[in-house]
Amino acid sequence: MPLLFHPNPGTFLICDFRKGFCKPEMTKRRPVVVISPRFRRREGLCTVVPLSTTPPKPVEPYHVLLKLPEPLHPKKWPATEVWAKCDMVAVVSFQRLDLIRLEKQNGKRIYNQSRLDPDTLQAIRKAVAYSIGL
């Protein structure tokens, strides 16, 4: 189900890159982190950086290692170390985005609502700037 609100910068979400993208672009569902604030007259879009549990070889200045206090999803993505792939930054529609659904408790869905700390978010933004030559 698509998001109905602009997520805050540093929020972890799931993004469906399967439709409308072609290899070597990102072409699967994967966790992302939001890096853009909400802008006026830019409704329904946000800028995200995909996350990967596979370390890049070699590590470049546009890769950022995130050491999370807990996994984004204990079964689907159990790692606490993930890599921000800042060279794969994308502006996507809310139609592609969803919250990270965990399990149900007492019939109610529980979501991962963790966010990045400001320093790590800034490191990702710097790596994105590097990746596009700024």
Image (spheres, rainbow, N blue to C red):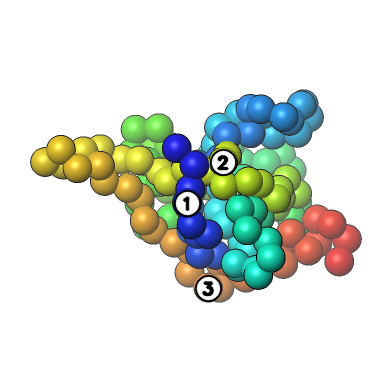
- Asked if the residue at tag 3 contacts the one at tag 1, i.e. Cβ–Cβ closer than 8 Å, the answer is no
The reply to whether residue 65 is in sight is no
Question: Which of the two labelled residues, at mark 1 and mark 3, occupies the earlier sequence position?
Answer: 1
Near-viewer residue (113 or 40): 40
Element under disc 1: loop
Q: Residue furthest front?
A: 41
* Disc ID at residue 4: 1
For discs 1 and 3, the disc positioned in front in the rendered view: 1
In the displayed structure, 51 sits above or below 123; it is: above
Report which residue position mark 3 lands on. Answer: 118
Q: Alpha carbon of mark 2 to alpha carbon of mark 1: how far?
A: 9 Å
Instruction: State the SS at label 2.
Output: helix
Rendered-image quadrant of the N terminus:
top left
- State which tag comes first along the sequence, 2 or 3: 2
**Image-based side of 59 in relation to 84, left or right:** right
On the image, the x and y values in percent for residue 133 come to 88, 60
- The reply, left or right, for residue 60 in relation to residue 93 is right
Q: Position of residue 126 (x, y in %)?
A: 72, 67
Q: Residue at x 80, y 55 (%)?
A: 131
Q: Image point 60% across, 67% down: which residue?
A: 38
- The residue that mark 2 highlights is 95
> Which amino acid does the dot numbered 2 rest on?
Gln
In what element is the residue under mark 3?
helix
